[in-house]
Image: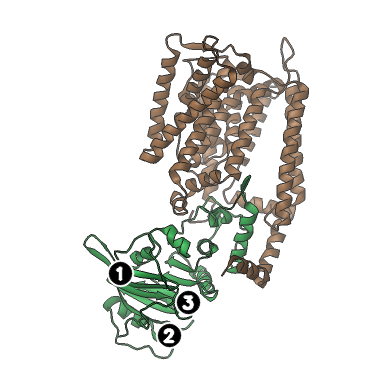
């Protein structure tokens, strides 16, 4: 068993090179007598996709809610770009550059793509909304992410496919210079082609230098897109390792029993991407 | 990555260029723009098409049954009749956009009328503008109180405004007292609904409105085209402006024709100018201001709006204030038309007609979809049914039945159109 491979350097440093974007140490959260998270450690580096997997009730949701400021952890420390931080509200997380795309996407069907992407942070002019500036920025963000399948950025979100809606939600998260994008089950409701489209987008985000964390039940997706796999079990982080040192059976073992006796062979059939 | 870097990569990427040029060809021409509109309509965004079609149908029907329906005199009369319905319906649109309902606006209008009439009495002696101002302020405060109860305490709008319907009816009856009615002797107030502009003034007002509309529309569309945004082609912009001009000319010709029976009566009624002004302001607020966008966002997905950091109670309360304020304007017009206000005011029927008018006009009862224009058009439909059936000698009973059927047809069109939308919405 290989645990906490990220424990190479506990004391955070200011040097940009090897300091992860977000470093979490000993994060714990309980609800009454229920221990949702117990001493969770994780590093989330920029430019990589970190997958967070675990069985139902393993604490995945609680964990991302702690990062995105919806829950305040009972204990634990957080370093953002090497400096200690406390995230107490979603807007504090957003100020740091943490954006979360929840499973329900939080889009307004009756508004168009531009209006959705800027909802709550509209650009204003003296006479009202600055539509021109917002439409340009929205289009630039979408094209930079190569989201090219939408007919027009002035389309209502109601008329988009599931994958397009997910793409808009992700672009909305990226629009505000976010550095860490957390996605909760981004492919859960999608078909095969739409899933590929969204996973490609996730990959591009990481290649552009964003830190990405995806929560997923679907190990196919995880092995297709992730660089690192973090496994939660009963509120504890049982394993974090690069995807190259893992395979599907190891992850399933870790999720169900907390350990695995297997070692990953050199790139088996399903592990590549 | 900074925003300028994103922008740079967007401009330099081959994918970005391909997308932009594809976008240009699909919407840059008149044909392409119309095709996009057809796609939108088939996707369930029918807008004002059903109500305009319905208006034409109703007009043809009544005209074929009674040649008096489409005369200048009757049409102007119809538009004046429609004013109160249209104003109340525009108010109701705000509540419906939130996915809420306001049942109190009939008697809010009544109370507004009573406040104005009471203060404008010669024995009290307030000038007309102060009396109207006080009436509108009272209406807005009612909206504030009801909106606060709905949003801060979390009571259902149906119940709060149902209580409002009863409460404000009681207050109205109380003020009217045993006399039961207040005559309005102020000429300015009475002229609001009954007075007309001179022929020349009618032309002048129409031209100013069309020129301002043309200037704003042209500047906006040209700016969007220049910035490479989704914009209608110049031909369509010109068509919109010409259409507005033709509509304005038709209205002024219609109202400037002599419609008197014993003495000549002509000129654009003030009340039409007032309804148009309210329509213009609310259209701007809902379509161009952040507040309007938030109203739509809350109606579409309140949870998404909350997560986006929108202060829901404030926006909702303000929307309920807009509803009540507009109802107050409707009440002023109502009293002005009757030159008095009495206990005969039936706020229950008024509010039901205003909800019906908003829905007939194309506003959704489920929130998030609707415009001020829908209220105006729906009000005209209801007035047209009332007026046309009156000309044909039908009873009030028959009018209610037909209005009900039209309402059902309108809701059915909305429901069927929405069914054609993509799954998951």
* Residue at image coords 65%, 51%: B38
Could you tell me which quadrant the N terminus of chain A lies in? bottom left
Q: Nearer the viewer, residue B386 or B305?
A: B305
SS at badge 1: loop
Q: Horizontal placement of B281 versus B135: left or right?
A: right
SS at badge 3: loop
Disc 3 vs disc 2: Cβ atoms closer than 8 Å? no
The chain to which mark 3 is attached is A
Disc 3 vs disc 1: Cβ atoms closer than 8 Å? no
- Alpha carbon separation for disc pair 1 and 2: 24 Å
Instruction: Give the number of the disc on residue A244.
Output: 2
* Residue at image coords 54%, 40%: B363
Q: Position of residue B231 (x, y in %)?
A: 69, 53
Q: Horizontal placement of B226 versus A123: left or right?
A: right
Compare marks 1 and 2 and give the one earlier in the sequence: 1
Q: Is residue B331 above or below residue B45?
A: above
Q: Colour of chain B?
A: brown
Compare marks 3 and 1 and give the one earlier in the sequence: 3
Chain identifier for the green-coloured part of the image:
A
Mark 3 or mark 2, which is nearer to you?
Answer: 3
Q: Which residue is mark 3?
A: A48
* Residue at image coords 47%, 72%: A211
Q: Tell me if residue B399 can be seen.
A: no
The chain to which mark 1 is attached is A
């Amino acid at each position: 068993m290989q645990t906490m491979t990220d424990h190479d350097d506990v004391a955070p440093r200011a040097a940009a090179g090897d300091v992860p974007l977000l470093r979490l140490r000993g994060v714990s959260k309980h609800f009454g007598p229920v221990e949702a998270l117990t001493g969770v450690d994780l590093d989330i580096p920029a430019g990589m996709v970190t997958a967070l997997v675990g069985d139902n009730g393993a604490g995945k949701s609680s964990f991302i809610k702690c990062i995105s400021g919806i829950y305040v952890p009972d204990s634990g420390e957080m370093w953002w770009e090497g400096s200690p931080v406390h995230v107490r509200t979603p807007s504090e997380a957003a100020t740091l550059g943490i954006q979360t795309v929840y499973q329900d996407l939080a889009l307004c069907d009756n508004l168009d793509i531009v209006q959705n992407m800027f909802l709550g942070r509209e650009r204003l002019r003296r006479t009202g909304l600055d539509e021109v500036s917002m439409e340009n920025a929205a289009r630039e963000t979408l094209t930079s992410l190569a989201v090219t399948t939408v007919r027009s950025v002035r389309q209502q979100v109601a008329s988009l496919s599931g994958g397009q809606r997910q793409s808009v939600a992700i672009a909305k998260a990226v629009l505000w210079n976010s550095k860490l994008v957390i996605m909760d089950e981004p492919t859960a409701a999608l078909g095969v082609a739409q899933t590929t489209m969204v996973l490609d987008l996730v990959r591009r985000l990481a290649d552009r230098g964003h830190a990405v964390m995806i929560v997923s039940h679907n190990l196919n997706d995880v092995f297709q897109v992730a660089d690192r796999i973090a496994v939660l079990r009963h509120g504890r982080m049982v394993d974090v390792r690069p995807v190259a040192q893992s395979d599907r059976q190891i992850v399933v073992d870790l999720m169900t029993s907390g350990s695995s006796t297997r070692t990953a062979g050199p790139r088996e059939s399903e592990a590549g991407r | 990555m900074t925003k300028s870097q994103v922008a740079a990569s967007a401009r330099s990427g081959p994918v970005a260029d391909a997308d932009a040029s594809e976008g240009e060809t699909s919407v840059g021409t008149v044909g392409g723009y119309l095709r996009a509109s057809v796609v939108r309509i088939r996707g369930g965004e029918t807008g004002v098409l059903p109500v305009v079609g319905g208006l034409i149908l109703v007009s043809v029907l009544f005209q074929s049954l009674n040649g008096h329906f489409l005369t200048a005199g009757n049409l102007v009369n119809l538009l004046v009749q429609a004013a109160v319905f249209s104003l109340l319906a525009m108010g109701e649109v705000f509540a419906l956009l939130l996915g809420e309902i306001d049942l109190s606006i009939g008697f809010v209008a009544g109370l507004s009328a009573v406040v104005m009439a009471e203060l404008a009495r010669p024995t009290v002696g307030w000038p007309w503008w102060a009396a109207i101002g006080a009436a509108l302020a009272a209406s807005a405060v009612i909206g504030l109180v009801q909106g606060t109860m709905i949003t801060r305490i979390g009571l259902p709008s149906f119940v709060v405004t149902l209580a409002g319907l009863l409460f404000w009816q009681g207050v109205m009856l109380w003020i009217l007292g045993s006399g039961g009615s207040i005559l309005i002797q102020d000429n300015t107030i009475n002229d609001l609904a009954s007075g007309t502009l001179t022929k020349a003034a009618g032309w002048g007002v129409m031209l100013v409105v069309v020129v301002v509309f043309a200037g704003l529309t042209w500047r906006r569309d040209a700016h969007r085209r220049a910035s490479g945004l989704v914009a209608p082609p110049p031909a369509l912009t010109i068509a919109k402006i010409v259409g507005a001009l033709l509509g304005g000319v038709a209205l002024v010709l219609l109202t400037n024709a002599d419609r008197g029976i014993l003495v000549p009566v002509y000129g654009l009624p003030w009340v039409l100018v007032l309804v148009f002004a309210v329509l213009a302001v609310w259209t701007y607020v809902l379509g161009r201001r952040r507040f309007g966008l938030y109203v739509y966002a809350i109606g579409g997905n309140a949870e998404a709006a909350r997560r986006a950091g929108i202060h829901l109670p404030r926006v909702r309360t303000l929307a309920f204030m807009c509803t009540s304020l507009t109802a107050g304007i409707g009440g002023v017009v109502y009293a002005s038309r009757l030159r008095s206000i009495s206990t005969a005011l039936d706020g229950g029927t008024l509010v039901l007609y205003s909800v019906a008018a908003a829905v007939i006009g194309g506003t959704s009862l489920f929130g998030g979809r609707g415009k001020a224009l829908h209220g105006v058009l729906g009000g005209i439909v209801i007035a047209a049914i009332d007026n046309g059936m009156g000309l044909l000698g039908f009873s009030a009973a028959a009018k209610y039945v037909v209005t009900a059927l039209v309402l059902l047809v309108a809701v059915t069109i909305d429901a069927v159109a929405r069914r054609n939308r993509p799954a998951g919405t």
